[in-house]
Amino acid sequence: MARILIGCECSGTVRDAFEALGHEAWSCDLKPDERGSNRHIIDDILNVIDPANELIYGKWDMLAVMHPPCTRLCNSGVRWLKVPPPNRTLEDMWRELEEGAALFDACLNSHIPLVAVENPVMHKYAKERINFGDVEPFYVQPWHFAEAEDSPDNEKKRTGFWCKGLPKLKPTGKLDGSTARNSVHFASPGADRATERSRFFPGMARAMAEQWGAVA
């Protein structure tokens, strides 16, 4: 079985899906693991994938970065690059764009042989700052992996993946999207809104573990 790092995750959803299939899966985030797992690294993902730190963290067969900071990279936030939100400056917005793009680039182009980086649809300024090489994204919806209407995956949230050495995810669900909820888009304002909106979906995580785990 493979040794797999799930970057930018503190919920354990994707990590546990791979671990359930027998892989040695670890999550990594600046926040503690919500489930108190001992398979969680509290550190900057860039430190964990740095070849210079292999004596500390070991080698990885696969890297899946599920929730990289994307607020400044995705289309939904491009307006803030012209008119910043209250109490923020344009300098803040562009600095965060540069940092987010640099993180995405470093993960996608890491030395790890199999890589998947998740992100919503990007705007042109983000694309200009990332070396994609010949990697083309593919997009899926959570409801593609929902087994029933009341499934937590039966949601609308267009999700993009940029992958190296890994195939496109094949839908495993039975629904056509007509009953998919839009609760991610309409999440209530508050301090936890960004965290709740970025939570991963168990059916999609299971499909990743099954399909990408087979390659790893």
Image (cartoon, grey):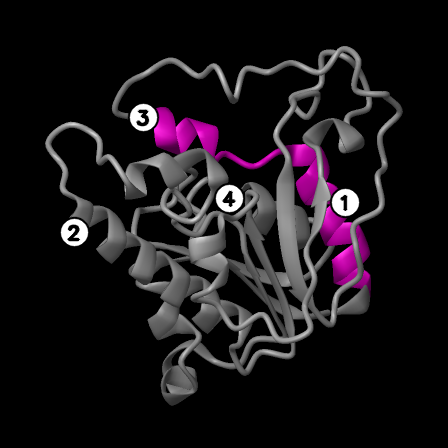
Give the residue pinned by disc 1. 207
Distance between the alpha carbons at the discs numbered 2 and 4: 34 Å
Return the residue nearer the eye: 126 or 68.
126
Q: Position of residue 173 (x, y in %)?
A: 84, 30
Return the residue nearer the eye: 129 or 50.
129
Circles 4 and 3: CB atoms closer than 8 Å: no
Residue 208 sits above or below residue 111 on the image: above
Q: Nearer the viewer, mark 4 or mark 3?
A: 3
Q: Residue furthest left?
A: 87
- Identify residue type, mark 4: Gly
Task: Inspect this view and state whether residue 37 appears.
Answer: yes
Give the residue pinned by disc 4. 12
Circle 3 Cα neighbour tier, 10 Å, few/some/many (<14 / 14–19 / ≥20): few
Distance between the alpha carbons at the discs numbered 1 and 4: 15 Å
- Identify residue type, mark 1: Ala
Quarter placement of the C terminus: bottom right
Q: Nearer the viewer, mark 2 or mark 3?
A: 2
Quarter placement of the N terminus: bottom right
- Identify residue type, mark 3: Asp
| Secondary structure of the residue carrying numbered label 3 | loop
Distance between the alpha carbons at the discs numbered 4 and 3: 17 Å
Q: Residue furthest right?
A: 174
- Identify residue type, mark 2: Glu
183 relative position to 41: left or right:
right
Q: Which residues are magenta?
A: 193-214
Q: Main secondary structure of the magenta part?
A: helix
Q: Position of residue 35 (x, y in %)?
A: 43, 38
Q: Nearer the viewer, mark 1 or mark 4?
A: 1
Give the residue pinned by disc 2. 91
- Magenta run includes residue 206: yes
